């Protein structure tokens, strides 16, 4: 038995944590009983270089502790002139708080606690969805959180609250390539924070202050819960059951089958009802943004766009005025493109900054009356993290962390409105559906909204122009093309850069699988990346027509892109699939 001088800060933190742990798991841990584990953990993982910098607090709590002789001998060997036995024990105890907290977090985590963590670190500021998932015959059931990927921006990023694992369906994304990435590792990558700091923050947000933070969950932006896969499964199962009913004449069997059909239809109705309610909320929010917009087109007119086309497509601008709507405020200084579904319903809004250069945009926003607050939070957090050991700056609050994430959001070149799932729509498709185009010969698919607007303004004969809002054509977008333009030639016109060329090749295979047998590619002139680079002068239409006439079949485009150095993906280079002969 010996007297151990435990600093008061460590004692308070550890007492609070042990109280929570003991209440949750019905245990009776004390500092004395956990001390041997702390020392053992320090001997295995601790860094003695930091010991002499550790005891900065001069107020101590004296208490007697028991320590096994072997552990006592081991830590005695670590002593030198600058480090005392008390220093080692004190450091070991505090060091063990981190893995102890980490274990506690993983055993306590649930959906709501995970939402608080993701919100705190800014991973769901653009909204999220909950996707019920299950694996048959394994007893495994959970609800995945779906949102935009913080690493690649794809909208198929998922988080499993049960084990904190994360992933992304986007090829080449770090979250897709790593099978063991969890929320903590993700934060280390995106926020460049130390593991102990992350654990302490998560513990405070989701465990210690959980009850106080619960109201924050209600403020989060929930997107539509997409159950397209489940809905298809239900409909397929109902058809199977109906066929079985026709086959069997046994009343007892058909009664069971009818009962299952009734339960499935009830579930289907609930899914549709929930989606309709979410769509109403999203529609209201989108119309609020539109009401705050003005018809000011200086940015686009300078780039050769036609005013009458911008007005026809309901494009608008959000200026410097601060409104009562939170989402509108975050989209200020942007040209906004309303995106409508094929049947003409407002599905979402994509807002593009009028300042293209990232550095110039950042400097401009720092002076804005609202965004300045966000920037101050970023500076505050940066100073605290840089000088936290010296305690020169106060610890950032939860509001500071939120404002810092908002700064990252408003600093992006492109923002999508709440609940908008771009993979389910094609920009400008509604215009051709409204006009009931019957003699469509070709469909041009471009990457950006500006490209689509510029092409649309020239009213190309028997030609439909749509944007997939990115260089990745989704399954839903391919289905839309098949539904409305199944017999047309598809012309792929993504940007002439690495990602655009790769997107063209992948879209080609997806469209071929969908049944399209006439697919070609636009090869832009040298020093031209997309149609947005065309000037808009009187000769532009003729220039566009020439580029379209010079479109390439798959095999020629493929070889040209290899020669140009824009096609580098080995999987695409050595894809054994045959190309479609062009008719």
Image (tube, rainbow, N blue to C red):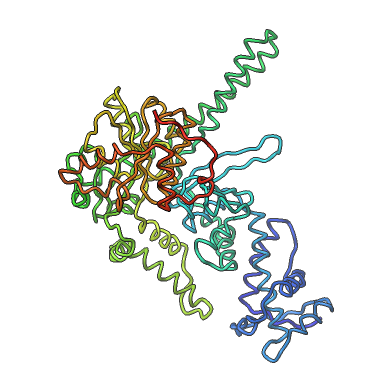
Res 196 quadrant in image: bottom right
Instruction: Tell me what residue is drawn at x 63 percent, y 38 percent.
Output: 134
| Extreme residue in the bottom direction | 81
Q: Quadrant of the C terminus?
A: top left
| Extreme residue in the top direction | 249
On screen, residue 11 versus residue 170, left or right, reads right
User: Looking at this view, is 509 or 385 the one in front?
Assistant: 509
Residue 343 position (above or below residue 531): above
User: Looking at this view, is 35 or 163 the one in front?
Assistant: 163
Q: Quadrant of the N terminus?
A: bottom right
Res 207 quadrant in image: bottom right
Instruction: Estimate the x, y position of residue 9 in percent, counting from the top left.
Output: 61, 76
Instruction: Tell me what residue is drawn at x 43 percent, y 62 percent.
Output: 399
Give the number of callouts: 0
Instruction: Estimate the x, y position of residue 206 in percent, counting from the top left.
Output: 57, 57
On screen, residue 178 versus residue 385, left or right, reads right
Instruction: Tell me what residue is drawn at x 58 percent, y 24 percent.
Output: 264
The answer to whether residue 280 is visible is no
The answer to whether residue 272 is visible is yes
Residue 365 position (above or below residue 215): below
Instruction: Estimate the x, y position of residue 290 in percent, counting from the top left.
Output: 27, 43
| Extreme residue in the left direction | 538
User: Looking at this view, is 413 or 85 the one in front?
Assistant: 413
Instruction: Estimate the x, y position of residue 263 in percent, counting from the top left.
Output: 59, 24
Res 262 quadrant in image: top right
Instruction: Tell me what residue is drawn at x 49 percent, y 43 percent.
Output: 129
């Amino acid at each position: 038995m010996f007297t151990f001088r435990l600093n008061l800060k460590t004692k308070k933190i550890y007492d609070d944590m042990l109280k929570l742990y003991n209440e949750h798991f019905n245990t009776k841990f004390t500092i004395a009983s956990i001390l041997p584990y702390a020392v053992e953990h320090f001997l295995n993982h601790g860094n003695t270089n930091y010991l002499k910098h550790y005891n900065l607090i001069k107020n101590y709590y004296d208490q007697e502790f028991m320590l096994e002789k072997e552990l006592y001998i081991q830590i005695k060997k670590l002593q030198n002139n600058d480090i005392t036995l008390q220093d080692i024990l004190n450091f070991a105890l505090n060091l063990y708080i981190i893995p102890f907290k980490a274990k506690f977090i993983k055993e306590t985590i649930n959906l709501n606690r995970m939402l608080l963590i993701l919100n705190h670190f800014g991973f769901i500021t653009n909204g999220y969805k909950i996707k019920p998932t299950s694996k048959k015959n394994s007893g495994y059931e959970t609800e995945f959180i779906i949102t935009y990927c913080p690493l690649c921006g794809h909208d198929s990023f998922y988080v499993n609250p049960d084990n904190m694992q994360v992933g992304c369906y986007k090829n080449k994304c770090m979250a897709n390539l790593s099978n063991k990435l969890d929320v903590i590792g993700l934060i280390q990558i995106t926020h460049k924070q130390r593991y102990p700091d992350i654990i302490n923050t998560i513990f405070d947000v989701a465990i210690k202050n959980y009850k106080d933070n619960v109201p924050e969950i209600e403020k989060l932006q929930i997107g539509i819960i997409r159950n397209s896969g489940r809905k298809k499964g239900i409909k397929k199962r109902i058809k199977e059951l109906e066929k079985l009913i026709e086959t069997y004449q046994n009343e007892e069997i058909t009664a069971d089958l009818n009962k299952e059909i009734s339960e499935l239809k009830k579930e289907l109705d609930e899914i549709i009802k929930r989606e309709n309610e979410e769509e109403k909320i999203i529609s209201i929010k989108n119309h609020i943004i539109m009401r705050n917009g003005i018809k000011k087109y200086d940015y686009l007119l300078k780039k050769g766009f036609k005013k009458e086309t911008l007005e026809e497509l309901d494009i608008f601008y959000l200026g410097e005025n601060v409104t009562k709507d939170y989402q509108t405020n975050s989209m200020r200084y942007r040209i906004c493109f309303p995106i409508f579904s094929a049947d003409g319903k407002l599905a979402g809004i994509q807002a593009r900054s009028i300042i293209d250069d990232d550095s110039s945009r950042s400097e401009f926003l720092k002076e804005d009356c609202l965004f300045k607050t966000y920037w101050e939070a970023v500076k505050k957090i940066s100073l605290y993290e840089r000088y936290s050991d010296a305690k020169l700056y106060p610890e950032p609050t939860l509001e500071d962390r939120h404002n810092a994430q908002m700064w990252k959001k408003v600093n992006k070149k492109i923002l999508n409105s709440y609940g908008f799932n771009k993979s389910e729509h094609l920009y400008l498709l509604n215009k051709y559906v409204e006009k009931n185009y019957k003699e469509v010969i070709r469909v041009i698919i471009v990457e950006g909204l500006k490209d689509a607007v510029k092409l649309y303004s020239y009213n190309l004969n028997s030609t439909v122009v749509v944007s997939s809002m990115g260089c990745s054509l989704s399954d839903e977008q391919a289905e839309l093309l098949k539904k409305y333009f199944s017999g047309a030639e598809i012309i792929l016109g993504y940007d002439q850069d690495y990602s655009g060329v790769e997107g063209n090749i992948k879209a080609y295979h997806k469209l071929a699988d969908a049944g399209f047998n006439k697919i070609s590619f636009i090869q832009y002139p040298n020093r031209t990346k997309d149609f947005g680079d065309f000037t808009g002068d009187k000769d532009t239409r003729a220039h566009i027509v020439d580029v379209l006439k010079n479109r390439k079949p798959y095999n020629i485009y493929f070889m040209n892109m290899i020669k140009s150095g824009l096609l580098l993906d080995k999987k695409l280079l050595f894809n054994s699939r045959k190309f479609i002969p062009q008719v």
